[in-house]
Amino acid sequence: MTDVVRTLLFPITMLFGPFINDALGEAGKAFSQEFARRSDYCTSQEQEIEADVVSVRLLAHAGFDPRHTVRFWEGRQESSQAAECSHAHAIDASRRAESLSRQWMGEAHPMNVVRVQKLKDELQRWEIARQAARKVRIGEWEEDEDMRGVLV
């Protein structure tokens, strides 16, 4: 991609010599590398959210209440913005640049907000499935009770 841009700009930049050409080439490479890195960042966010959902499933199967996970992330979200001594107040220049680039890439919500919402959606889906399974079990139990009366 950068070579195509350099080729198209060469008639204009040849008047300025190789220094401008090289500078444009390096800027194009830097932009394409940064764009690729930001694309990978979006993928890693999706993987983080998927890992959260899987971990909630594992905790639920192990007997823990999965709603505590949502409370944990909500508490982290509130405490990181409110606490004076928190890590959020020690953001360095690279984190600020990352935040700006996420806004540039179109991400308007902080990661914790998205994470909490996805976990709530998953818990809601589980609740609907649990209620449906419960209705099926109750229906089977009532059928068994009806059959016992007929057989006896």
Image (tube, helix red, strand yellow):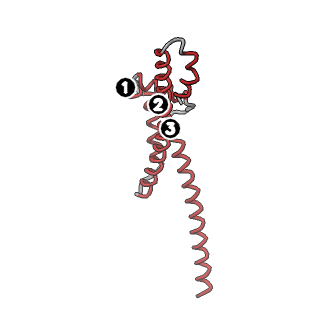
Rounded to the nearest angstrom, the CA distance separating label 1 from label 2 is: 35 Å
Residue placed most toward the observer, 20 or 144: 20
Q: Quadrant of the C terminus?
A: bottom right
Residue furthest to the bottom in view is: 152
Query: Image height check: is 118 above or below 108?
Result: below
- Disc 3 or disc 2, which is closer to the eye? 2
Query: Pointer 2: what residue?
Result: 33
Categorize mark 1 by other alpha carbons within 10 Å: few (<14), some (14-19), many (20+). few
Query: Pointer 1: what residue?
Result: 85
Locate residue 151 relative to residue 30 in the image: left or right.
right
Q: Quadrant of the N terminus?
A: top right
Could you tell me which residue is drawn at 46 percent across and 24 percent down?
97
x then y, percent, for residue 138: 58, 69
Rounded to the nearest angstrom, the CA distance separating label 3 from label 1 is: 29 Å
Q: Earlier in the sequence, mark 3 or mark 1?
A: 3
Query: Image height check: is 27 above or below 46?
Result: above
Query: Pointer 3: what residue?
Result: 42
Categorize mark 2 by other alpha carbons within 10 Å: few (<14), some (14-19), many (20+). few
Could you tell me which residue is drawn at 54 percent across and 23 percent down?
6
x then y, percent, for residue 52: 45, 46
Q: For the residue marked with disc 3, what is the amino acid?
A: Cys
Q: Earlier in the sequence, mark 3 or mark 2?
A: 2
Q: Secondary structure at mark 2?
A: helix
Q: For the residue marked with disc 1, what is the amino acid?
A: Cys
